[in-house]
Image (cartoon, rainbow, N blue to C red):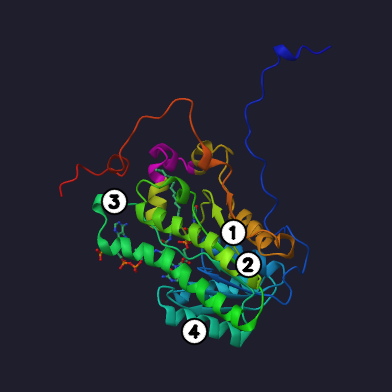
């Protein structure tokens, strides 16, 4: 008989790796004949979400401010299956938002699915944040999401057709986000919009859900957000190229998320297999947002974390 008590315990190995890139979570053709509009679909997580819908047969419309990035992503996404159109748009402008829907309708028809992925964020202590910095983040993240959603809802209500909205959030909508006061407040507003509009529009067949990514590093991350990740890991890890391992060791999953894991969740939420799910915000973050230590960590102010000296007014 083996003496289990004397065997060393295997080290924790974290959550299993995701299915390989290119695999789909839903049956082939789930989105055949469907139009999906993704804001910020030219970069990062938005592009990963768009790719998953494309693999499943959707026609895509991607919209954001920078035409060059949109064009590059359009070519990449077109290789995955369906048709792809890109429309330059600043979602803070309701007139431009209406034009995106006009362009989508002209190309393929009224989008059946809207993914509100575009957002803005940079770390800054609240006392250093200018009024314009606040406005910029809140206008893009919250007002832009509302303008897109409103346009989608109005067109579907007028046409009498069902639809599905997915708004990308962040877990600090529940917890607050020191250093990200603007973005956290805006994402809390996005979560609240999901809950209000799911009830308002359920009777018309429109689902409204939220989807929250955990830490999912990708090559398009802004310098500001990348800088924040660098602060979270000691300098020697950057030098040795071990940043990914260091970031992983700080997650309960013992790994970071892969953007495609968000794509699979989005494709499920808007699919025929999720028709009774609405008003819900799904968190895909390996339980990172629920972390609590047995012992509270020492408090380090946001100023100190960002290497800023005392506030001088
Ligand atoms: C401690 C460890 C923690 C580890 C975890 C870290 C990871 C956290 C991840 C959090 C979740 C991520 C959520 C996200 O949303 S990521 C998405 C990020 N992507 C983007 O933001 C893309 C779009 N962003 C932008 O284009 C720009 O950032 C910006 C929003 C600034 C652009 O908008 P706009 O063109 O309208 O803006 P302006 O350039 O005119 O600037 C407007 C005002 O904002 C001030 N500003 C800009 N950058 C900063 C900064 N870094 N710090 C302070 N202030 C800033 C700018 O000066 C303008 O204000 P003033 O006119 O008063 O000067
Ligand atoms: N990456 C992560 O770990 C996390 C991300 N998130 C959320 O995930 C989503 C995607 O983030 P991520 O992919 O990392 O970030 P990116 O910076 O790659 O994407 C942001 C996108 O939004 C677009 N955008 C920004 N402002 C506007 C605007 N005014 N009008 C239209 N489009 C705009 C940008 O395109 P352009 O510049 O061309 O306008 C860009 O494509 C966001 O909602 C973010 O808050 C939440 C938690 C963690």
Name which quarter of the figure residue 66 lies in. Answer: bottom left
Residue neighbourhood size for the residue with mark 2, other residues' Cα within 10 Å, grouped as few (<14), some (14–19), many (≥20): some
Q: Mark 4 — residue? A: 99
Residue neighbourhood size for the residue with mark 3, other residues' Cα within 10 Å, grouped as few (<14), some (14–19), many (≥20): some
Front-lying residue, 66 or 94: 94
Marks 3/1 in contact by CB < 8 Å: the verdict is no
The answer to whether residue 206 is visible is no
Front-lying residue, 311 or 305: 311
Say whether residue 273 is left or right of residue 111: right
Marks 1/2 in contact by CB < 8 Å: the verdict is yes
Marker disc for residue 202: 2
Between marks 1 and 4, how big is the CA–CA gap? 27 Å
Q: Nearer the viewer, mark 4 or mark 2?
A: 2
Of pointers 4 and 3, the one earlier in the residue sequence: 4
Marker disc for residue 126: 3
Q: Position of residue 84 (x, y in %)?
A: 61, 77
**Which residue is pictured at 46% across the width and 51% down the height?**
173
Q: Nearer the viewer, mark 3 or mark 2?
A: 2
Q: Position of residue 215 (x, y in %)?
A: 51, 48
Q: Secondary structure at mark 3?
A: helix
Between marks 4 and 2, how big is the CA–CA gap? 26 Å
Between marks 3 and 2, how big is the CA–CA gap? 37 Å
Of pointers 1 and 2, the one earlier in the residue sequence: 2
Name which quarter of the figure residue 38 lies in. Answer: bottom right
Q: Is mark 3 within 8 Å of ligand 1?
A: no
Residue neighbourhood size for the residue with mark 4, other residues' Cα within 10 Å, grouped as few (<14), some (14–19), many (≥20): some
Front-lying residue, 268 or 47: 268
Q: Position of residue 288 (x, y in %)?
A: 53, 41
Q: Mark 1 — residue? A: 279
**Which residue is pictured at 63% across the width and 83% down the height?**
159
């Amino acid at each position: 008989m083996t003496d289990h008590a004397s065997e060393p315990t295997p080290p924790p190995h974290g959550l299993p790796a995701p299915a390989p890139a290119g695999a789909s979570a839903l049956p082939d053709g789930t989105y055949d004949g469907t139009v999906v509009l993704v804001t910020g679909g030219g970069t990062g997580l938005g592009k990963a979400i768009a790719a998953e819908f494309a693999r499943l047969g959707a026609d895509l419309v991607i919209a954001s401010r920078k035409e060059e990035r949109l064009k590059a992503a359009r070519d990449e996404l077109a290789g995955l299956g369906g048709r792809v159109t890109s429309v330059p748009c600043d979602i803070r402008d309701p007139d431009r938002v209406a034009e995106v829907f006009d362009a989508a309708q002209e190309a393929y028809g009224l989008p059946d699915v809207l993914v509100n992925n575009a957002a803005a964020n940079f770390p800054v202590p609240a006392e250093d944040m200018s009024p314009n910095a606040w406005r910029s983040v809140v206008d893009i993240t919250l007002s832009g999401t509302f303008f897109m959603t409103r346009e989608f809802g109005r067109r579907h209500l007028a046409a009498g057709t069902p639809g599905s909205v997915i708004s990308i959030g962040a877990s600090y909508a529940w917890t607050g986000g020191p250093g990200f006061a603007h973005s956290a407040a805006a994402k809390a507003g996005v979560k609240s919009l999901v809950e209000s509009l799911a009830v308002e529009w359920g009777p018309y067949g429109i689902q409204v859900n939220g989807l929250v990514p955990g830490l999912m590093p990708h090559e398009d991350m802004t310098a500001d957000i990348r800088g924040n990740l660098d602060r979270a890991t000691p300098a020697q890890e950057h030098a040795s190229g071990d940043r990914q391992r260091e970031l992983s060791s700080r997650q309960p999953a013992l790994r970071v998320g892969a953007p495609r894991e968000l794509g699979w969740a989005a494709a499920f939420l808007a699919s025929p297999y999720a028709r009774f799910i609405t008003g819900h915000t799904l968190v895909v973050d390996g339980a990172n947002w629920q972390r609590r230590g047995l012992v509270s960590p020492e408090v380090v102010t946001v100023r100190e974390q960002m290497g800023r000296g005392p506030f001088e007014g």
